[in-house]
Structure formats: C-alpha cells, structure tokens
Image (tube, rainbow, N blue to C red):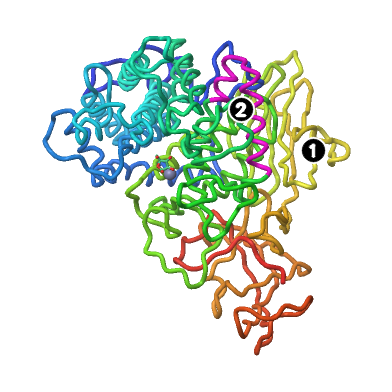
Amino acid sequence: MPHPRSAMPSSASPALPDQPVVPSGPVRPGPAAKAALAPAAAEVQGGFWSTRRRVNGRTSIPQGPELLESAGNLDNLRVAAGLTEGAFQGAYPFVDSDVYKWLEAAAWQLAQAPSGDEGPLAADVERIVSLVAAAQQPDGYLNTWFQLLKGGERYQDLRWGHELYCAGHLIQAAVAHHRATGRRELLDVAVKFADHIDSVFGPPESGKPIDGVDGHPEVETALVELYRETGERRYLDLAGYFVDRFGHGLLGGEAYCQDRVPLREATDVEGHAVRQLYLLAAATDLATENGDTELRAVTERLWAAMTAAKTHITGGLGAHHDEEDFGDPYELPNERAYCETCAAIASVQWSWRMALLTGEARYSDLIERTLFNGFLAGVSLDGERWLYVNPLQVRDGHTDPGGDQSARRTRWFRCACCPPNVMRLLASLEHYLASGDAGGLQIHQYATGRYTADGVTVRCETGYPWQGTIAFTVEETPADRPWTLSLRIPQWCRKYRIRYGDTAYDGTDAPATDGWLRIERTWAPGDRVVLELALAPRLTAADPRVDAVRGCVAIERGPLVYCLEGVDHPGGGLDDIVLDPAGPLADVHRPDLLGGVTTVTASGYRRPRPEAGWWPYTPADAPPSATEPAPVALTAVPYYAWANRQDGSMRVWLPTQ
Ligand code: FUB
Ligand code: ZN
C-alpha cells in the first residue's frame, strides 16, 4: 500500500518520492539475511513510552533547529555551501553529525505524524536537507570542519577527523528520511558520499588511494543499512572491509579506537565505549547479511563478556571519564561512572541487531534495562535538558556547574552528541519492540500499541512499568493455520501468570524457555492473552568483585532501577545513609510526582559519623563515633527521573551496614 505521505507536495524541492514507503525502522535485514527474526511493524499508542515520545516529538525535536542554529552547526553548512561567509563554529570535527542525528530523529518523527500533519517539522527537515545537499562538494565529500577550517585537507587525520563517522550519521539520516517519507533528496546526497568513500578507501590490492579506517566506527553499520536500502552490494563489501581493517595498526594500534586487536580475535570489549559498540553493531549487521559465523561468534562472545563484568546495573557502559572508555572487568565505579548516554543508545542498537540475528531473549533483556534506566536518564522529563554522563552517585558536597561530562542536567553541550541521539532513538523506538518469523510474532518490550508481522496483528494494552498486567488482543490472524505468540519473560521476573482462553497458568504450568513464553494455537480475532508479571520491589546485589558496591544493594522494581535523591531526604544528605535489608519495601504510586511514578519506600538510618578518617581496625567493630544511628525513612524514585527537581545528591547503590 502506498504510504500516505508518498504523494506529499514539496514547495522547495520538486523531487517526488520514487517508491511507495513500506514502514520500517533503522534496521531492516535484507531478503537474504541469516537473521532469526525480522522487525515487526509497530505503533506505540499509549502508556509510558507514548508520554516520553510525545515530549520528544513536541519539545525536544522541534527545538533542535534553534539549538543547532545557535551552536553554529547550520551556519557551517551555509558557509560550506557558499551561501554566506564566516568562520567554522564549534569545537569538534564531528559537529555535522549533530545535524544528521537530528535529521534522522525528525524523519522518524515525521513517519508518525498523521498524513498532512507534519507542518513546521517537515518544513525544517526540507530546509536543512537542502542545506546539507548544497554543502556537499561535487565529488560527494562533505565535512564542514575540513572544508572550512582545514583548507579542504581530507583524510589526513583519520584517527580524530571523524569524516567517515559523520558520513555514517548522514547515511543513517538519509535512510531514515527515505524510509519515513519516501523522499530521496537526502538519500541522493548519502549515495554520492558513499560512492566517493568507496572510490577512496580499499585494501592495498584494490589500488584505491587510502587503506584506512575512521577512528570512530559508525560508517560501517550505516553502509550496511544503505546496502539494505539501495541493494547496492558495494556498500556491504565496503563495510566488511572497514570492520576487518580495525586492529591492524592503521590508527596507531590503540585500544581507544578499536585498533589494538583485529575484531575477530577480540575476547572482551575495550576502548572508547561508543566506538566499540558501533563497531559491534556493524559486525552483527555483517554476520546477519553474510552469514559470517565467525563474526557472529565474536559478537556473542563480546556481548557475554560485556554483560558479565562491564555493565552497570542501569545498563550504562563505559567506566572511565578520561577516555570515555570501558574499564577493566568489574571496574564499575559509582560517582565517576561514565555511562555516556550515547553508549546506552549504541548498546540498544547493537543488542537489537543481536536479538534479530539470534532470536535470543537475553538481548532484549539488556535493551529493556538500558531503555528504562541508563538511556532514559539522559533526557529530562520536560525534554529540554540533558545528561551526557550518567553517574550512579552524586555526593552531598558535589559542586558542578553543568556542561559536557558533568553530573548536572544541561541545556546543550559543546560536544552535543547525546541529545540528538536520544531524539532519534525515542522517535524510532517502536521499531525495537517486536519481531516476527515464520512461526509467529515475538513481543520483546511491553508498550501499549499494535504489532504486526506476516498477516498477524496483536494489540497490547498495559500500564507497564508501573503495573505488571499486559493484555494482548488478536486483531488479525490467518483463520486456518496456527502461529506462536512469544512473550519475553524478563530476566528480572521471578513470578508470572498467564491467562488465555478460560485458563490461568503460572510459571510452572507455562514455563518460559530461554526467556520466551511461547503460546501456539490457531487464533481467532478477539482472542485475548493476559500476562501478569509480579513487580514487587526487590533488592539486588552485585558480583563481589565490583569493589565499588560490595556490601551494597540496589532497589529495583520491574525493569526500573531506583535511586535515592537528596531532595527526598532532608536533614543530612545521602553520604551516611544505610539501608536495612531486613526491613520492608513498599511501593506507592504517586501521580503527582515526577510526571507520575511509583516510589519505593524502605527503612534505614544515618550511620554515625566516625571521629576520624582512619582508626585501628578490629573485626566487627564499628568506627568510633560520638553519635547514635538516626533512623530515616527512605524514599526511592526511578533512576530515569532523577535530577528533575533540583541538582542535589543521588545514589543508586545503598550500603547495608
Ligand atoms: O566522537 C564523537 C562522539 O563524541 C563520541 O561518540 C562520544 O563519545 C563523544 O566523544
Ligand atoms: Zn554522546
């Protein structure tokens, strides 16, 4: 069926869409792909994610052009296009990518607008797409930093230049624009740039001028998607060449930019977290398209290593501030947790590709943990302020004026990689929720909405994550053949019930296999299945090798990680707080608080302050203190909602003594 927008008139550009739009998202494995699952078409129509996406669509995305204007990103394009004169604005060679990520977000947003309702956003997109096209050089090259500041000196600094990284974001934006609207103005720019890159980069035997890779992977996964969109095999091969050239010293052999060891030989994630994760997303894409079992094994191995010892409870990734990189195994600090918002996004992107490739539920478990916690904390509830890094603790005496890499929400950053990245993931979120295969429909994430795969449509209604009841109604089904509805039983869930027909089953009667609860039958329209996940608050401890949190617990409820905030605990801050693990945990829904959240209360006390910083140690002795413990009622709020009331203290992990 032609997409309603495929006939949209264009005032600025006469180009008409060249093909009907089949709604699809950022990842669309090709017809010959070896993926176990294919993304399902989905709509989010209510509930938790609908609220967050409404803020994204009504506030964050519409404010993008003004922010990009005031940061100089758009002027850079104007100058490169010869439309105006001026100097390069911005601190980094990758500022163009902020524009491209915003364009991608806006494209996915346009895909959700009812036909004809795109209004100013469509006009902004069209205007900025024209600017990008005008700034492109005749041979396809485009990077305003190098065009304006470096006198056109291209590809001289692959380690830091980000030229291919920016190209990657441009390609992803173009694919999104094409998939969402059917228009190909931006796709034409992307194809021209990709062809240029293909003419310049290649292995020594290819005779091409440069045997090299970009210090920041990103173009690789983008090229695979461009192949999927255009059918042009050269882009897939180019992506494969790039992925296999990391680890050969072309970037000086540094782990930071994934050059210490060839990916196929890697045994653990390392280096700059976003770089590592984008590279692994590309490797998964290649394994999917090429049936490359060695590459698949690498991605499985590294994902297992990452989740075993390098992932914070929030799903946050990257332990170090100095190089934005992964630390050693079990090196997972609290105050200085880096957990860049972009790394959370990259993790979701990679894990979704893994989920599609393998069909395994554990990848969607991590997606859920990351989405609800480490990712969502990156944007304020009003959609106007951002966190670049996402620490797990902010101390009482913390003084931080905000800005890049700070623990304070900030309006925009000098390095503004995260905000438009959040915008594009939220705007395309429905594509990460469900999948289909020859056997039926798999629901990976629970959100009120509608999911469709291969002649099957199921509607989902739920108050998740506040409530554990998730009701499915079959709306469309083949009458004559059975199919399987697969529901992910989250890894955190200890108890569930499922009702279908007149019967209710618990986890013993209807066990989940490898995280999937599979219900196979010949369905009829109107059939209902109700899943009830027990959401009682719980305490979670970490592997004792994580020294930073040994003796601590975290409060969780359903998929949400909780934290204490200073604002809820006046009279002494959080540094001395101790939770009584034997005390009761109670949940209370508070529609008035933080846009409506379920809080968890617990009992605890403030540890008496020791008289000195060090004292002679005796087993079982408390440090000498002049004061008595003071009981405190603890109130925990979801981590994603922290720092929306004031810039105070916060902690996720709570000592138990
Ligand atoms: O280098 C481009 C982006 O800026 C990275 O992905 C982020 O980590 C930030 O350093
Ligand atoms: Zn970022």
Q: Dot 1: few (<14), some (14–19), or many (≥20) neighbours within 10 Å?
A: some
Q: Is residue 622 above or below residue 594?
A: below
Residue indicated by mark 2: 265
For marks 1 and 2, give the one nearer the viewer: 2
Q: Quadrant of the C terminus?
A: bottom right
Where 370 sits versus 522, above or below? below
Q: Observer-nearest residue: 439 or 372? A: 372
Residue drawn at x 55%, y 38% as measured from the top left:
347
Callouts 1 and 2 close, C-beta under 8 Å: no
Q: Is residue 540 left or right of residue 591?
A: right
Residue 183 lies in quadrant: top left
The residue drawn where x is 66% and y is 81% is 615
Work out whether residue 615 or residue 292 is closer to the camera in this orientation and state it. Answer: 615
Relative image position of residue 588 (x, y in whole percent): 65, 63
Observer able to see residue 229: yes
- Residue 463, placed above or below residue 604: above
The residues bearing labels 1 and 2 have C-alpha atoms spaced at a distance of 47 Å
Image: magenta residue range: 283-308
Q: Secondary structure at mark 2?
A: helix
Provide residue 20's location: percent of width, then percent of height: 42, 14
Q: Which residue is disc 1 drawn over?
A: 499
The residue positioned 67% from the left and 72% from the top of the image is: 578
